[in-house]
Image: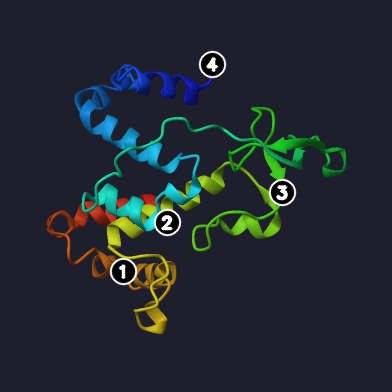
Amino acid sequence: MHLLDLFKRKAEEEQLLDIVDKYNDNMQTHRAEVVEMIRVVVWCLQSDFSRRPSMSVVVKVLEGSVDVQNNLDYNFTTPVVPRPIAVVGHQGDAIGAATLLFASTLSGPSDKDQSQVVTMMRGTPGYLAPEWFSSIITKKVDFYSFGVMVLEMLCGRKNLDRSQLEEDMHLLDLFKRKAEEERLLDIVDKYNDNMQTHRAEVVEMMRVVV
């Protein structure tokens, strides 16, 4: 029932290929790469938080410039944080009628009948979706964080880079300005030959990020 439990068992049996999506031809064609990506996931799920990679390191791994750490611990768990949060249901439910649940490791609602949750802000500065400031969130906050990470990969820099000029320090601000000027090609990673060769595709991917 629980994917992480299945994941752990298959890892111990060295049969991770068994859980690669069987209905996705692309996944099956590139199963070796998928398993390598699974190792990135394991690294991020380490029970000892000091062993987990930073977001910038994950970006470098996805770019191929850094290898996944060896001796990964597959005994990770899905902890339940003993902090109640108020869960808001569909439009017919008032916030005042919200029920109290314990937060899971997911940012958003854990029940399919829940559309949003009321909780405290948590996450990595620079990757938090704007709706965190209202404390009413949905699972879409994870998409925002993923979008920021993808943009970092395409541009070859962190979201917050204090080595840049003040006006270029924040990648999202720079991104917005270049989009308004129709000059997104300016921010494609200049040190990545593959990115430069496929700049048109990179800009299209930036549109996905938007």
Local SS, label 2: helix
Q: Position of residue 167 (x, y in %)?
A: 41, 81
Local SS, label 4: loop
Amino acid at pointer 1: Glu
Q: How many circles with numbers are drawn on the protein? A: 4
Q: Is residue 21 visible?
A: yes
Q: Which residue is mark 4?
A: 1
Of badges 4 and 3, the one in the foreground is 4
Q: Residue at x 37, y 77 (%)?
A: 168
Label 1 neighbourhood size at 10 Å, few (<14), some (14-19), many (20+)? few
Q: Residue at x 31, y 69 (%)?
A: 182
Q: Position of residue 49 (x, y in %)?
A: 49, 47
Q: Which residue is mark 2?
A: 148
Would you place residue 71 above or below residue 174 in this image?
above
Q: CA distance from mark 2 to mark 1?
A: 20 Å
The label number, if any, that marks residue 119 in the structure image: 3
Judge by depth and name the residue closer to the eye, 16 or 92: 16
Would you place residue 98 above or below residue 207 in this image?
above
> Could you tell which of marks 4 and 3 lies nearer the N-terminus?
4
> Could you tell which of marks 3 and 1 lies nearer the N-terminus?
3
Q: CA distance from mark 3 to mark 2?
A: 22 Å
Of badges 2 and 1, the one in the foreground is 2
Q: Quadrant of residue 100?
A: top right
